[in-house]
Amino acid sequence: MEYIQQNFNVNFSYGVFFSSNLFDPANTCLSSFLESKAEPAFQKKLLVILDGGVVAHHTNLPQQITSYLQTVRGFQLAPEIITISGGESVKNDLPLLFSLVDAIDKYGIDRHSYVIGIGGGSLLDLVGFAAAVSHRGVKHIRIPTTVLSQNDSGVGVKNGVNYKGKKNFLGSFAPPAAVFNDAVFLTTLDTRDWRSGMVEAVKVALIKDAPFFTWMEEKAVTLTAGDMPAMKELIYRCAALHMQHIGGGGDPFESGSSRPLDFGHWSAHKLEQLTNFELRHGEAVSIGIALDSVYSFLLGWIDESAMQRILTVLKNMQLPIWHPLLEMQDGKPSPVIVGLEEFREHLGGQLTISLLRAIGKGEEVHHIDLDLLYKAVTICKNNQ
Amino acid sequence: MEYIQQNFNVNFSYGVFFSSNLFDPANTCLSSFLESKAEPAFQKKLLVILDGGVVAHHTNLPQQITSYLQTVRGFQLAPEIITISGGESVKNDLPLLFSLVDAIDKYGIDRHSYVIGIGGGSLLDLVGFAAAVSHRGVKHIRIPTTVLSQNDSGVGVKNGVNYKGKKNFLGSFAPPAAVFNDAVFLTTLDTRDWRSGMVEAVKVALIKDAPFFTWMEEKAVTLTAGDMPAMKELIYRCAALHMQHIGGGGDPFESGSSRPLDFGHWSAHKLEQLTNFELRHGEAVSIGIALDSVYSFLLGWIDESAMQRILTVLKNMQLPIWHPLLEMQDGKPSPVIVGLEEFREHLGGQLTISLLRAIGKGEEVHHIDLDLLYKAVTICKNNQ
């Protein structure tokens, strides 16, 4: 038998920029980036896909974007800025996905051109996937507008849409060409989005960075009340930890089983789905973190004071730490806890759940004791 | 402005195995590969998607596949082998794409499991894309069954489907987990597929490997008549050159403009489309190679004897070197030559066309002289 071995590395590199008022003519952050990518021999194109929820708060934004991007040397802006609604529902809409693919075709966005998504994490997931499958991948720039997308999903490498009720069933790993976090968009977030977006920072601190957790303990009340300098610091530190994990963790495209960043997420995904996304992602993750932290305590991995510190931070952020669907329902198992098997199927292979060995140190297990888990549910309920 | 730079490498590695009678119980090539990937903690799954055109010639194949794969330790075969038609038309069928995604869902193919595609290049392109977008990429194994797919597309890293009449508009770069070339499938190819599959070997030899071209000159007549040992050697050498280019060329996912492997392809894509795929891909590429070789001669890049050697090899392989659509049509420009701009749009950026500096040495240009191109058409016509 003859045999040829193929082996190569592909380098992925992108910057995450932290700025304010990106489309102010005086702000050259985005235009400088683009102009650094211009080529003398031909024009590159730009197509903007914008979150209607953002436009509702920033009504001049489409006009500002147009004025700003029309002056970028070497680039030609598509004649239309596409505005779509934001929120999780855009990920349930395959015709919308194809309408974006059609726009990429119609406006001649080729592999040298850029699709720019501006919005929350759901819109960015959708736009990133449309870009990733068109022409085998056109470049995309992300401008996340929420706390959650600025500190977590928007700076990462995944995209995706839901399919037949399964979250992110269709998607890919496709690093962005660049990410621009604009703090001005945070000023118009509603209270729930402002608060719940902090939870991924709590999560990543708990599994990786004890001093960051301590900092959040100190800041939780003022952060929750709207302290913007503190929020900017939270976003920066969370984004940096997230990016270090992707770039330095050895498995950026998740070919193995280990997914420590999923701490608190197995129950959260199911809670979101069971509540028809009335729970925000961050709220569901807050409940998930509380549950898995208490479970870690019941296993003897963290002590009671550590558990209480975690629950207190979440409560100080005005986030939920329990939900009735976590309990037995009329003598039947909790539909969330039944979802543990679904979570295993989604990841494939062995059940792999991240727990806490200490504040700042995650560790994975491959088995969950259901009796202990129901005890953890009760402790969460009693600590609300 | 604050800034975080992300930078990481992803390693891609896969083997291409050359064997015969893959599903003979005595042949452990495929089963050994799979068993090397087994894990004690859980079962991985296998889903086979099979080309109906292959089954027509190998009627026991579904039964053989089932018997063979059911015995692989650590793996569970899906209860159904999915048979679909082969040929380019499967790439025009989005509902078929989604039916494969549905099967991946239904049979619980997760990111540790494998989708195995068995068929020609079109089927493999479709199956590879369905796998690439499910769960952000499930592993796929390719078993190419034609000369063309065994020496070229099947050993590469691309997949894709056509969309709204645009070839490969939707697709991705997704290296396979492994490729198994089985020579037995070649014995039942029809004459046109056998012959036209050789043209990618002519192409890659012309741009990269003069001794391989000389070898094909010597073997062209016997290859065309059905010499299997020679064909195996042609496939091995062509696959190796193709893989070296991808792995060693510095741009496996084609982020830049340079695409030397597209030599002869700009007109070929258009000819396929304009003839409703009545021309095989390899036949169209043969015409494209002839045209671009003659154009290279008219530019003074290769001498007349080199040009004649190229045309002679193609003619000895009983492949076409001209098509009426290359000429002016009733005083209007050739619809193929008009397609030059479409080709540029597909790649984006500057027009980039590979030509020949010598047999064995490709070189790119960014401008085509249309008068000279029509002269090349006439020379091809007169040399048939």
Image (cartoon, coloured by chain):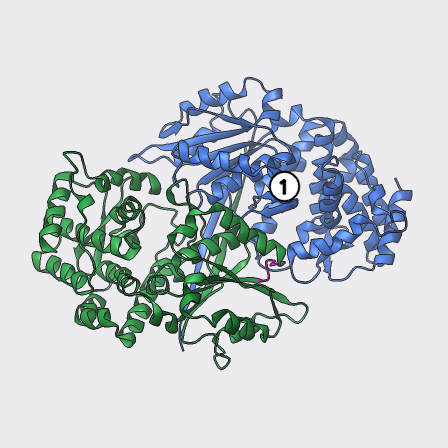
Chain colours: A green, B blue
Quarter location, residue A204:
bottom left
B147 drawn magenta: no
Residue A309: tell me if it is visible: yes
x, y (%) of residue A1?
A: 54, 32
| Screen quadrant of the N terminus of chain B | bottom left
Q: Is residue A245 left or right of residue B240?
A: left
What is the quadrant of residue A336 in the picture?
Answer: top left
Question: What secondary structure prevails in the magenta region?
Answer: loop
Residue position marked by numbered label 1 in the rendering: B152
Chain designation of label 1: B
Q: Nearer the viewer, residue A197 or B353?
A: A197
| Left or right: A339 in relation to A144 | left
- Give the residue drawn at x 77%, y 62%: B367
**Which type of secondary structure does the marked residue at label 1 adopt?**
loop
Crowdedness near tag 1: few (<14), some (14–19) or many (≥20) residues, C-alpha within 10 Å: many
Nearest the viewer among B266 and A278 is: A278
Residue B129 horizontal side relative to residue A159, left or right: right
Give me the residue at 55% from left, 75% from top: A67
Whether residue B17 can be seen here: no
- Residue A261 image offset from top left, x and y in percent: 30, 54
Which percent across, then down, holds residue B271? 76, 43
- Number of disc labels: 1
Q: Nearer the viewer, residue A188 or A308?
A: A188
Position above or below: A201 against A349:
below
As drawn, is B28 to the left or to the right of B315? left
Quadrant containing the C terminus of chain B is top right
Over which residues does the magenta segment extend? Answer: A108-113
Identified by mark 1, the residue type is Asp
From the top left corner, tell me how far across and down residue A71 is, in percent.
59, 76
Q: Which residue: 26% across, 72% down? A: A226
Q: Residue at x 90, y 51 (%)?
A: B331
